[in-house]
Amino acid sequence: MATDISKLTLTARWQDLTTGMMIHAGGTSEEFNTGEWTSVKPHVKEEDCRQCLLCAQACPDSAIPVNKNERVKVDLKHCKGCGICAKVCPFDAIEMEGL
Amino acid sequence: MSYNFKEIMSRPERLAPGHRMCAGCGGTIAARNVLRALHEGDHAVIGNATGCMEVSTFMYPYTAWKDSYIHNAFENAGATISGVEGAYNALKRKGKLKEDETYKFITFGGDGGTYDIGFQSLSGAVERNHDFVYVCYDNGAYMNTGIQRSSATPMYADTTTTPVGSVSSGKPQNRKDLTNILVEHDIPYAAQTTFVQNFKDLHIKAEKAIYTKGAAFLNIMAPCPRGWRYHTPDIMDICNLAVETCYWPLFEVVEGEYYLSYEPKKKLPIEDFLRPQGRFKHLFKKGNEHLLEEFQKEVDRRWESLLKKCK
Amino acid sequence: MAKRDRLSGNEAVSYALRQINPDVFPAFPITPSTEIPQYFASFVANGQVDTEFIPVESEHSSMSAAIGASAAGARSLTATSSCGLALMWEELYVAASNRLPVALALVNRALSGPININCDHSDSMGARDSGWIQIYAENNQEAYDNMVQAFRIAEHQDVRLPIMICQDGFITSHAVENIELLDDGDVKNFVGEYEPENYLLNPECPTAVGPYSVTDFYMEAKRAQAEAMKNSKQVILDVAKEFAQISGREYGLFEEYRLEDADYAVVMIGSAAGTTKDAIDQMREQGKKVGLLKLRVFRPFPAEEIAEALKNVKAVAVMDRADSFSDHGGPLGAEVMAALFRNRSQAYAINYVYGLGGRDVRVEDMEQVFETLEQIAATGETGDTYRYMGVRE
């Protein structure tokens, strides 16, 4: 049975923890917003983007999703603002902006 | 093997966002691009040695891995995945796992868990030729504990256990050539890669490693912005310079045969790779020219030796 | 039909393992447990089992691989002794905290240094706080019977803890004795299939094992682990009851030998209990009221039950085949005395360290222990409560 991590909060009792602290689910980290770590965010100038997808590939945080050959909106809930995407973009279509 | 970049980029992400690796981390770039080489429909069990990646990608109750995942300890990722692969064989044999359910086994370790403390376990696992891939994301020091030297740390690097001082120029020894040591285990596939261009080299090697029957080893240079002290967004430039200076040659060894994956048209001087990195800052002080010469000599020696093997 | 045979302890445990037909068995040789993976490898070579046997490069790796296999959904075990167990140290805790029902056939041997290949309990006693269930045997029959029961206990939903099945190096492992063996079919039915709810190789749902835990969760995780150990006591008794139905042999948490009306008692673990029983029989003939409590289950520690069994004795000697170098006694001594204290026992209690590195235990030695207890009760003078037996002075 899949683990419902919404019950595993900091107030969970010992009886509520999963056996052996295993988690029976994949990708539960999406519930954790690492986007709060940063004070800069990428801004994509859509008119300049040629959908080459290099930014999506080089992102360490899987925060530039690709759907059917196209980059979709940057996942700002998780982006840590490292700036790699802006650097690798061959078309200067990404700018890092202060929040 | 073909490289349909857009199709590959459209595959479902197997490393979820929300992990706690540092901003700009090379380790996760390596991991998610290796996982992208898994064929759709194939399951995987990911192994992981203790290190940055482990403490950041599975912090209870948050796992960043879409596939099954096991972390055991620092020094035993090879042995742990051996047991998992053994279980797969046994469960298949006993009919407890359906014939059409395919699992692949991929273990990630930093250079600490791979070159050093986990070396015995890795050596044993590949010698037994379990059907798995060991991926080392080599960032050249024990980054998780705060940038201590490892046997993968390059000569003269300033680390917290080889600090530069009035009578010290950083790490006195050369780095261990682990890829070649793994090749000498006579495994079916070993390769060295990093992040260049559109990751074609990394992708193709990862796919070969995953889909070669038996033990495979993939050594991926994965820069660490904290430990190497370069400007975080410049990671791809750093990787490119490592390749163009022949510091980190791209090659693969298939059934004992060496193949050079890329030969720079004009080999760049090693200074180009070292200069952007704070850990080598002292090498550029007046009077330290001989250290740079030594470094260059070692890079040349290793490059020539590799070229001979590739002929 | 059960059959009678003559087997060594290692042969007996290997025989049980063939009958169990586990999924994965990683192993590395070390005296005196080496024969177990050797016998098992021949079962594999002859197609008598379909286990994945992994001859790893160290004991650390054998336990690591057993953990990986168990997490993956396989019934797994390994075997070792002495320094092999010490090398697994970290992994013992990992197996227990991940709540993986791995089994370990342990053949007790002294720890280095100096290097010594003979029996004492310093290896398993060193691992006593690692979270493993520990069950000990006096002879090959018990070693066999305990091995057959091991997975039923470890895999129980209320337990899910690793289990160590211990026997004395050479004294039990290599000595050939009469034994009664169960039918293959009976063992297969008794042990059953391992069907974990969640595991790595479950195509329906991925599983992540071995997290980093921040302070907010760590203590709750340990408390849950402690509960599993607490639960295991009843499970051990229930499994023993079921085992008695197929074997006719009954087991509890410990064996009481002529203890009911005893004034003087010895508490001990393992093969030396046989020698002690001989001493008791001889002294009983002389009218001495002496008895034995032979501990089978050391983890979980049956403190209340031991105190209850000893409630009428005047004096007790706790025999430790391991020293803890605490200047206070051995591990069994500390636990038994704590149990007696909590039960407001008025008995005199002393603690002996004996039999280290294979040092012989003779009937006369044990008679001497009982005589000492008699003197203590008579004089009210306990003297030093931390003593060595059988050492040249």
Image: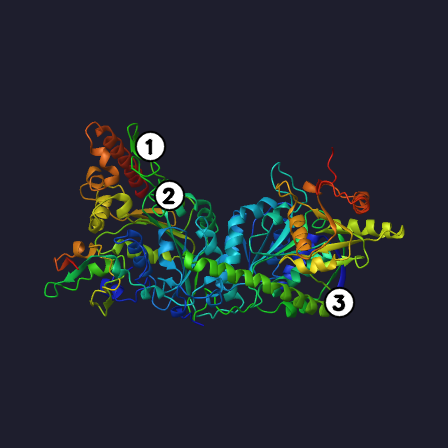
Foreground: disc 2 or disc 1: 1
In the visual, does B256 lie left or right of B156? right
Q: Give the image's coloring scheme.
A: rainbow
State the residue at coordinates (28%, 55%). B29
- Number of residues whose C-alpha sits closer than 10 Å to that of mark 2, classed few (under 14), some (14–19) or many (20 or more): some
Residues beneath discs 2 and 1 located on the same chain: yes
Position above or below: B249 against C225? above
Mark linked to residue B172: 1
Chain for disc number 1 = B
Q: Position of residue B116 (x, y in %)?
A: 41, 43
Q: Nearer the viewer, residue B267 or C329?
A: C329
Tally the marks: 3
Q: Are marks 3 and 1 in contact (CB under 8 Å)?
A: no
Q: Position of residue B227 (x, y in %)?
A: 29, 44
Residues beneath discs 3 and 2 located on the same chain: no
Mark linked to residue C248: 3
Residue type pointed to by label 3: Gly
Chain for disc number 3 = C
Residue named by callout 2: B178
